[in-house]
Image (cartoon, grey):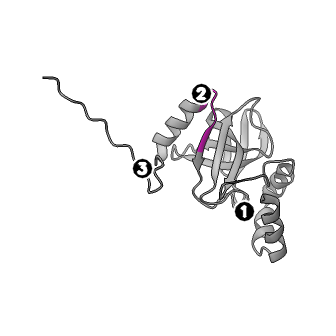
Amino acid sequence: MKSQRTKPALPMNKQGELSLSGSAFVTLLRAVLDKGVSFRFRATGFSMSPFIRNGDVLTVSPLSGGPHLGDVVAFVKQETGGLAIHRVVRTGAGNCLIRGDNSSRDDGYVSEANILGRITKVERNGKKTILGLGPERYLISLLGRKGLLVPLFLPVPRRLRTLLRRMQT
């Protein structure tokens, strides 16, 4: 009689989505992007707020032509081996200076070899958001590099929130 192999249970969350983190997630993401295919996943954390929020669904696509100033990229954090999504605020010599939009300090220079892909789509509540990935990304990058982006969004006035909501629909 043949012995039956049981497949290991996959870690699933309450919404029925595959729930991976750390090196397992990075390994899967790298494998998919290496095939030239885009990958969708749910963002966690607040370091890219207000442009990317906790729970937004992100699409990361393979890099073509390397990372550019203002791009939001998925990269491997050298200290932990985990994944982070932050904005390129300076490029040069095979490295990129990276910073979260809602952070007052840089992640430091990240080797282009550790940058896995570029965020090409952000979905919030089932709708595509465009603010932060279009031409305005250059201004966001400059403000972030100068440390002016976080103070700009700390006391977000009601009018600005209303404008952002209108731009997302």
Classed neighbour count for the residue bearing mark 2: other residues with Cα under 10 Å, few (<14), some (14–19), many (≥20): some
Residue type at mark 3: give it. Answer: Met
Is disc 3 in contact with disc 1, using a CB cutoff of under 8 Å? Answer: no
Secondary element at image label 1:
loop
Q: Which numbered disc covers residue 34?
A: 2
Q: Which residue is mark 3?
A: 12
The stretch drawn in magenta includes residue 39: yes
Residue 137, how many percent across, how many down?
Answer: 82, 50
Chain-order first, disc 3 or disc 2: 3
Span colored in magenta: 33-40
Q: Is 143 in front, or is 132?
A: 132
Residue 108, how many percent across, how many down?
Answer: 67, 48
Q: Which numbered disc covers residue 50?
A: 1
Secondary element at image label 2:
helix
Between marks 3 and 2 in the image, the one whose residue lies nearer the viewer: 3
Q: In the picture shown, does residue 18 fall above or below 144?
A: above
CA–CA distance between discs 3 and 2? Answer: 24 Å
**Residue drawn at the location 62% of the way across and 42% of the way down:** 75
Whether residue 125 is visible to the viewer of this picture, yes or no, is yes
Extreme residue in the top direction: 1
Q: Quadrant of the N terminus?
A: top left
Between marks 3 and 1 in the image, the one whose residue lies nearer the viewer: 3
